Amino acid sequence: MSATIAEIAAQLQGYDPQALSAEGVGAFLAKLVAPVAETETVGVLDALDRVLAADLVSPLSVPPHDNSAMDGYAFDGAQLAGGSALELEVVGTALAGQAWRGTAAAGQCVKIMTGAIMPAGLDTVVPQEFTKAGADGRIVIPAGLLAAGDNRRLKGEDLMQGQPALRAGERLAPAALGLIASLGIAEVEVQRRLRVAYFSTGDEILSLGEAPREGAVYDSNRYTVHGLLRRLGCEVIDLGVIRDQPALLEAAFTDAAARADAIITSGGVSVGEADFTKAMMKKLGDVAFWKIAMRPGRPMAVGRIGRSVLFGLPGNPVAVMVTFLAFVRPALLRMMGARATETVLLKAHSAEALRKKPGRTEYQRGTVTRAADGSLQVRTTGNQGSGVLSSMVQANGLIVLHHAQGNVAAGEEVDVMMFDGAI
């Protein structure tokens, strides 16, 4: 049985839902979520971004034979021991896909193409452009150019038969698909897609197609979160906009919990907002309401409704994206069965002074470029208000100013969470 919110909180030193650090959020979510159990088998072309469910053991060695890494001439490298130039007779040609069956003796070589199997007894290849023409069609290899074994790919140097080619939990990128295909494997077992339900809350939210009205805004969060989930490879259950009415909210949460592994909402969790959303979360599930020591994105709700994990995000567009990238995305990857990996932060020099108070983590939108000296630099997009959605379009990453960090001087090195591959 899954641990309750109270049981998880008891395991975390210094847990304070009213002043939770960004690091504390990550530690809590790591204990809250677990991978889905179901798997399915898909073809290689349908496996992009899916998570491998079991180790993939190589049925063959790659490459299957010693082969040439260059177009050139194969010979016995022991002949290099004397340190003198070699003049070799060409006695055959080895083509890729056609093994040469002859025998080359001392003083002889075989013309060979890239990828061709190394003839028996030969272990070294001289690139064609390194040779000179000798008498009677022979080739001359100048002294000091090669060592025995050069330009030869060894059998199994990429993958050895019977060894894992890919480990369970690998999220299959294009290179992994090529690796799987190179082993002659047509189908792989992957975790089933994570099902995530999403809805926005609030009477002030307009759906596309509705006429504008005073005090109302069009729902951007629904489309942003949909894109974030699709890019992550989730199956998205779009429940639209739910008004601040208890009956409608209860129906939406109940429907989402019945259909999804995770539920994401935006709005209704801030201090001073209508309490309908928070009240319904409490009524239907085991939920904690946090004030996170971060900017933007201070309010957040997490917990479970039925078997579904709940992420109640703030309503401001930038805060939704920041909390998703910092907390929800890593948690969903864990639920997908992906191996736990820390977010890689890029180092760049701040092109400007940044104001920051210790005691909270700040995520400032920034643009990383290359300076004249070749180093990486980052500059903020300007106004860092949590409603300035255009700044997320202009930025290519988030400048991460850590909990204990203070003001940053121009030229000082900072961490950046890059967007590429995430949004």
Image (cartoon, rainbow, N blue to C red):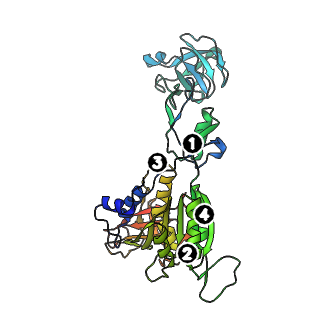
Q: Are marks 4 and 2 in contact (CB under 8 Å)?
A: no
Badge nearest the viewer, 3 or 2: 3
Q: How far apart are the two marked residues, 4 and 2, measured between alpha carbons?
A: 15 Å
Residue 158 against residue 110 in the figure, above or below: below
The label on residue 48 is none
Q: Which residue is mark 1?
A: 176
Q: Which residue is mark 4?
A: 227
The label on residue 339 is 3
How far across and down, in percent of the image, does residue 262 sit? Answer: 53, 60
162 with respect to 354 (left or right): right
SS of the residue at dot 2?
loop
Q: How far apart are the two marked residues, 3 and 2, measured between alpha carbons?
A: 31 Å
Q: How far apart are the two marked residues, 4 and 3, measured between alpha carbons?
A: 22 Å
| Amino acid on which disc 1 is placed | Ala
How far across and down, in percent of the image, does residue 145 sit? Answer: 48, 27
Near mark 4 (Cα within 10 A), the count class, few <14, some 14-19 or many ≥20, is: some
